Image (cartoon, rainbow, N blue to C red):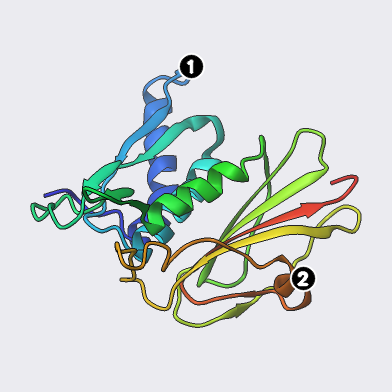
């Protein structure tokens, strides 16, 4: 059976990657070697997997050139046909239906809001993890926020640079880490545009991955 990339393990990935690269550079300071995470195995496809992957992506962004990529396994899974420990598909199917699981939506959200440059980001809330990126022209800044706790977290943004406006906010949230999508409820856990609500009351729901896009002239 595969090992599990849990939320807790994903949080440790920053230190793991840094330690690995430190060891490699001690062996060869001029190395051009980089890390490629070819499989994130989870043995689950519920909301917990989605949050773990979102946190892993934060670690990859912060690692910069040291990490080439990270990939979720597996892609396709037949509904109720995986009972051997690889119960971790992104796209489920039956003979007449195809639908996405929460982990696939998390991956798509990260791709839709990809920006090229890393921005320094930090939080004083241990229950929330964050990473920030911006476009090359500095006009668009994106915050990736994960609340892996069972309580809402009110957000207060402190940005260096000119005043920014909230352009778009997309949220993937669920009442339980075990929630998943089924043939009868294929979008039970799916992204929602919460731009208007977030602009007036910036709150991260329990068990949520939220992407915030900000627009301004200069950062």
The x and y percentages for residue 140 are: 77, 45
Circle 2 crowding by C-alpha within 10 Å: few under 14, some 14–19, many from 20: some
On the image, numbered disc 2 is attached to which residue? 199
Question: What residue is drawn where x is 39% and y is 54%?
Answer: 103
Q: Which of the two residues, 13 or 80, is positioned nearer the viewer here?
A: 80
Q: Residue farthest to the front?
A: 96
Q: Which of the two residues, 149 or 125, is positioned nearer the viewer here?
A: 149
Question: What residue is drawn where x is 91% and y is 54%?
Answer: 162
The x and y percentages for residue 184 are: 31, 67
Secondary structure of the residue carrying numbered label 1:
loop
- In this view, 208 is above or below 152: above
Q: Is residue 22 visible?
A: no
Question: What residue is drawn where x is 13% and y is 52%?
Answer: 82
Secondary structure of the residue carrying numbered label 2:
helix
Q: Is residue 131 left or right of residue 199?
A: left
Q: Residue farthest to the left?
A: 84
Q: Mark 2, mark 1: which one is toward the viewer? A: 2
Q: Is residue 196 left or right of residue 13?
A: right
Question: What residue is drawn where x is 30% and y is 51%?
Answer: 97
* First in sequence: mark 2 vs mark 1: 1
On the image, numbered disc 1 is attached to which residue? 30
Q: Report the label total.
A: 2
Circle 1 crowding by C-alpha within 10 Å: few under 14, some 14–19, many from 20: few
Q: Residue farthest to the bottom?
A: 151
- In this view, 23 is above or below 194: above
């Amino acid at each position: 059976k595969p090992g599990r990339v849990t939320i807790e393990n994903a949080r440790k990935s920053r230190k793991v990657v840094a330690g690995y690269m430190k060891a490699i550079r001690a062996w060869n300071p001029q190395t051009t070697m980089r890390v490629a995470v070819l499989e994130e195995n989870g043995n689950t496809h519920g909301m917990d997997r989605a949050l773990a992957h979102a946190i892993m992506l934060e670690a990859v962004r912060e690692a910069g050139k040291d990490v080439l990529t990270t990939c979720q396994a597996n892609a396709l899974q037949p509904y109720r046909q995986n009972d051997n420990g690889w119960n971790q598909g992104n796209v489920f199917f039956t003979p007449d239906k195809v639908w996405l699981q929460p982990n696939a939506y998390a991956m798509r959200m990260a791709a839709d809001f990809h920006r090229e440059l890393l921005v320094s980001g930090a939080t004083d809330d241990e229950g929330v993890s964050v990473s920030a990126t911006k476009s090359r022209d500095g006009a668009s800044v994106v915050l990736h926020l994960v609340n892996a706790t069972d309580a809402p977290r009110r957000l207060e943004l402190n940005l260096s640079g000119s005043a920014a406006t909230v352009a778009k906010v997309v949220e993937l949230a669920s009442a339980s880490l075990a929630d998943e999508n089924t043939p009868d409820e294929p979008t039970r856990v799916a992204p929602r545009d919460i731009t208007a609500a977030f602009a007036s009351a910036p709150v991260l729901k329990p068990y949520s991955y939220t992407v915030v896009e900000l627009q301004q002239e200069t950062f």
